[in-house]
Image (cartoon, rainbow, N blue to C red):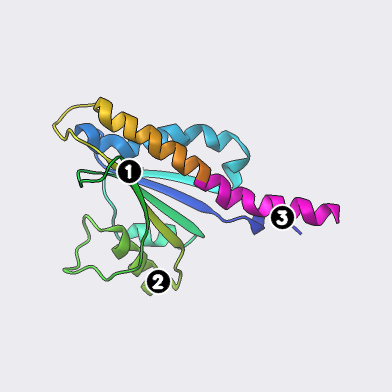
Amino acid sequence: MNTLEQKPKVLIHAYGNPGRGDDGLGNTFIQMCQPWLSTEYVHHLTIENSYQLNVEDAYTMSEFDIVVFVDATNELIEDFSFSKIEPKSQSPFTTHAMFPSGVLYLCGELYGKQPQTYLLQVRGYEWEMLEGLSERAERNLWKAFHFFRTKLEEWIEFEHHHEDEHEHS
């Protein structure tokens, strides 16, 4: 039996505009994840980056077991938040600037798939037309990244330990 197929396929999809200060948090998060693609994660992990979510993303996410959207936020959260997304019809329907819940809803409607979907929001502070992150946003990003790395290890390594036990019995 091929053990690669037993572990979940994970998509990390960050969105935002790196030319607008802290709105580039998602883009930087993706850059931080790049080294994972040269490790054992490579068979289980796909990373994507875009300015905004759109209809086509529903097809992409239909091919994964777990999807994590990463976005900057100016909401009053301490540093970052990680929450499960439920499918929700988005109206008025447009082909631009969709929400994660709307993309998940379309994934179910069009492709009959409902991957576990999460939103990792990182608190940002500066949204002007400039490249680079504010110091506070960068600190929040590192906290979110460390949290997420642990979460990813749980998802991918959980079954690995189970397989080891099975092989030794």
Can you identify the residue that label 3 sits on?
162
Magenta includes 36?
no
Q: In the rendered image, which quarter is residue 135 located in?
A: top left
Residue type, numbered disc 1:
Phe
Give the residue drawn at x 46%, y 69%. Answer: 113
Q: Is residue 89 above or below residue 135?
A: below
Can you identify the residue that label 2 sits on?
108
As drawn, the label of residue 148 is none
Q: CA distance from mark 1 to mark 2?
A: 27 Å
Disc 3 versus disc 2: nearer the observer: 3
Q: Is residue 155 above or below residue 26?
A: below
Q: Residues within 10 Å of mark 1 (few under 14, many from 20)?
A: many
Residue type, numbered disc 3:
His
Q: CA distance from mark 1 to mark 3?
A: 31 Å
Residue type, numbered disc 2:
Gly
Give the residue drawn at x 40%, y 71%. Answer: 108
Q: In the rendered image, which quarter is residue 131 located in?
A: top left
Q: Is residue 134 above or below residue 7?
A: above
